[in-house]
Image: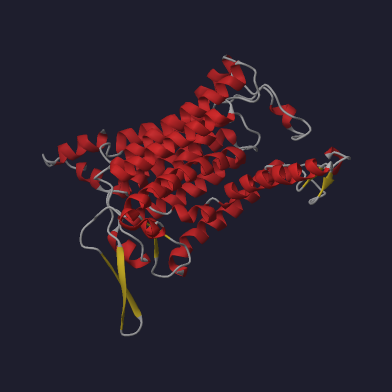
Amino acid sequence: MLYYLFRFLEQFGISGSGMWGYISFRALLALILSLVISTWFGERFIKYLKSKQITETQRDASIDPFGVKKIGVPSMGGIILIVAILIPVLLLGRLRNIYLILMIVTTLWLGFLGGMDDFIKIFRRNKEGLKGKYKIVGQVSIGLIVGLVLWASPDVKMNENLTMERQNGQEMVVSHSAEAEKSLKTTIPFVKNHNLDYSQIMSFCGKYKTAAGWILFVIMTIFVVTAVSNGANLNDGMDGMCAGNSAIIGVALGILAYVSSHIEFAAYLNIMYIPDTQELVVFMCAFVGALIGFLWYNAYPAQVFMGDTGSLTIGGIIGVGAIIIHKELLLPILCGVFFVESLSVICQVWYYKIGKHKGVKQRIFKRTPIHDNFRVTDEQLDPECKYLIKAPHAPKHESKITIRFWIVTIILAALTIITLKIR
């Protein structure tokens, strides 16, 4: 809103109004504003949650030895994140931008879905929350909407990085297509001067390969949104864990969105140029600012939990943001912590079921998601169960585990950006 106001005032030569045309100015302002809102609103909202007894009611002491101390801590803190993200975006973003609209819709959609889950857990005293099938339907639905809009919208275009020429045997020069057009190409990490084309994967469909490619793209969008939101949800198990990891990921996505929207940087990195994605930088700055402000209260010992209201929203934002800038294939690296958390649960269940068919009680890890494995003592293990991996034998405090996971995510974020040059 303010963007349009000051752009209008610029026509009358009012001093300072021209700054609102700079993405760097709006992005940094969004970062600061979201951080201030998150900390200011967060304090008041936490008091409100306590007054209404919207708090954590159950903890499994066998899994989390410190969990009983967390009973009574307010939950549904994800509302703080959503408010702190949306207000700066609505004030500072170009609201007619299709990419910004998709990010706002994703935030509201998954925020509502997670809020329903938290509502059932807290007010109906049902620790299972919203049934898994309804969660999946909600995640698949927003993935489908995003995929179809990116397919159908005439505003979604890009300039493909076409050729790489050598000058004087040393300098590399990348050229982009002259006109922006719809494309099914995406960036592959570690592969030099090459993009993956979804339509080429579906080339066996003959003259229908383009349509089939778009169908594959929509399916990929659904998979990415569902996988990343579930991964973030699983990662939300310790004070500050998900918020810190997600803030780091948000910084990396903001950088990728900026270089994708800048034709010179895109040429330097040999990636596709995607016009108008600079508005994603504003959104990602608001996203990072909101998470940092939330950490003020969510860091150990937590004064508030984000709940599924926050974790599902965070995962959806990351997934949709990566899809928009055609960097979804970088997510296994960038969101490596989320990926390992999900994989640990899948492997644990699979290994347990194999043993069950054989009449043997067995597990791979002491606990999953994998972060729980590091805080469980050997005395807490089931003596009748066989564990493939019992390390570490000395449990770590959750604050140490959290910070170490942050460090891993920082390394993965740096590696994700470096892959664009390693190619």
Q: In the displayed image of the protein, which residue is found farthest to the left?
A: 12
**Residue 182 point in image, percent of width and height:** 28, 52
Q: How is the image coloured?
A: secondary structure
Report the front residue among 413 and 353. Answer: 353
Report the front residue among 199 and 97. Answer: 199
Quarter in which the C terminus is drawn: bottom left
Q: Is residue 231 above or below residue 115?
A: below
Q: Is residue 85 above or below residue 223?
A: above
Is residue 226 visible in this depiction of the protein? yes
**Residue 61 point in image, percent of width and height:** 77, 30
Q: In the displayed image of the protein, which residue is found farthest to the bottom?
A: 168
Q: Residue at x 57, y 15 (%)?
A: 51
Report the front residue among 34 and 333. Answer: 333
**Residue 8 point in image, percent of width and height:** 16, 37
**Residue 246 point in image, percent of width and height:** 52, 44
Is residue 400 visible in this depiction of the protein? no
Left or right: where 20 falls relative to 342 = left
Q: Residue at x 84, y 46 (%)?
A: 386
Quarter in which the N terminus is drawn: top left
Q: Is residue 189 above or below residue 336?
A: below
Q: Residue at x 39, y 53 (%)?
A: 326
Left or right: where 66 falls relative to 265 = right
Question: How many marks on residues?
Answer: 0
